[in-house]
Image (cartoon, rainbow, N blue to C red):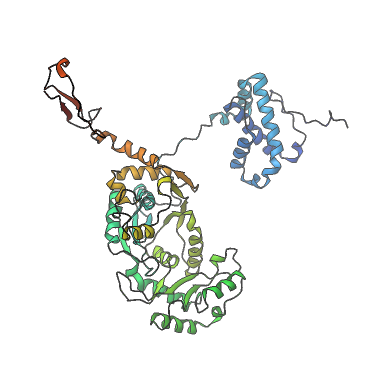
Amino acid sequence: MTGESHKRQMPHFTGQPLILMADAQDWDADTIATVRKYALQNAVEYDGAGQAGSVLGRLLGERADLRGRARDLKELVESEVAAANQLAASEGVEAARAALAATNPEALQRQKQQKRVGLKELPEAIRGEVVLRFAPNPNGPLTLGHARGVAINSEYAKMYDGKVVLRFDDTDTKVKPPLPEAYDWIEAQYEWLAGRPADIIIRASERMPVYLAHAEQMLSGDFGYVCRCTAADFKQLRDAREVCPCRTRSVEENLADWQAMNDGEIAEGGAVVRVKTDLELPNPALRDWPALRIQHTAHPIVGKAHNVWPLLDFQSAIEDHEQGVTHIVRGKDLMDSTRKQTLLYEHFGWTYPQTLYWGRVKIHEFGGFSTSGMRAAIENGEYSGWDDPRLPTLAALRRRGFDAAALRAFWIDLGLTQKDISISMQTIESFNSSEIDARCERRSFVRGPRLLSLDASGCSGGPGTSISNARHPDGAVEGSRKWELGD
């Protein structure tokens, strides 16, 4: 066989049946027809410069059954795209359009994707029954990062005539202890940003009997156990997928240790309560994860009422169920929390809420701030307070003149993309300018003023003449500014 006879025949798009390519026998007629449809469509849309990558993406979007064969499809797609582009180049784009209309007229109606307005719909949401939650740690006031949770959750509640639970996750008495005044700050800041108070307000520290009761139920049901291993020893066993010796103890033994933990008879670090999971799970963090630990430090709100405190994944999971939360919107960095809590829900026989995620957003000007870090810097005198204009707190942004509606609009416009992005404060400032422009007076000042002598004799009216400008160029703000020329 010669090299010439081995060359691929290019398909031609005439009124006659299309000539199949050399490797077409590897694909069924429906697949070939679908590839051809998108190749012609792409050539029409881009004036004969269709791209194989775009065509492959559209194909796999329609044919999920082909996604596992994307690499094998490459040659077929490239050939069809080349043929469609060749037709557009030799006979004009209208010829490609006619070929597409002959077989797939509906493909000519494809519209370019419209920019999304507002948030995407929640899955399995029933109007009037949606319950969401916003759950900050009250170790400081809300920040620009928290604003995302307030804006998104309150907007979804508005969309579905639902409710938002403002839950203070304050069951850590030692590492990130609550700041007593932060509770009131956060309630007020939530209302300012959301435009209305939260529907339900809960302090987890005041709900401790609920969490302790569920922990005891877990131990009694033998899907949890008290672990007396050191953290280092348990990690070694977990990573090796080996059973912790504490795991096989009886329910009675676990309940006895549980009582000792609550009575303060075991020192901090001497025991934890773990949730039993499959030790063969690929992610080590999910294997027998810790649910409750001992902390003897007094809590700022409830004092020394408890010696055992739940870790966040356990406390949050129990409270979400107790409050009937239907949808959780959280950062993608908390996907492991979802997996842990789902395993716990399976033990209790509960259905886990629908969960949506967002990616990280880095603000260039505020790259390295944390609430605990800001708190320490304020105490050290580096900042004047939580509303210091250099900080990314809502108090500071409000002091700088940022409008609540502008911050809401920014986060809602960004939506729930899981892509990590980095932006400048200029982007947020542009939202603020759009929001407040129509109602803002124009103010002026002179930096480094110097006294000048002006000859006003040539002005209409002479010395003593006044000049006035409207306070807003469009007249949206009543009144004017006046300057008088001295004698």
Query: Which quarter shows the N terminus?
Result: top right
- Report the front residue among 310 and 392: 392
Question: Where does the image place residue 422, in percent across and percent down from the top left?
Answer: 46, 45
| Left or right: where 102 falls relative to 359 | right
Q: Residue furthest right?
A: 1
Q: Is residue 134 visible?
A: no
Q: Identify which residue is drawn at 49% across, 48% down.
A: 418
| Left or right: where 470 falls relative to 194 | left
Query: Which quarter shows the C terminus?
Result: top left
Question: Where does the image place residue 402, in percent across and percent down from the top left?
Answer: 30, 43
Question: Where does the image place residue 416, in percent across and percent down from the top left?
Answer: 45, 47
Q: Quadrant of residue 45?
A: top right
Q: Identify which residue is drawn at 53% across, 71% down.
A: 288
Question: Where does the image place residue 463, in percent across and percent down from the top left?
Answer: 12, 20
| Left or right: where 187 falls relative to 18 | left
Q: Identify which residue is drawn at 60% across, 36% down.
A: 54
- Report the front residue among 242 and 248: 242
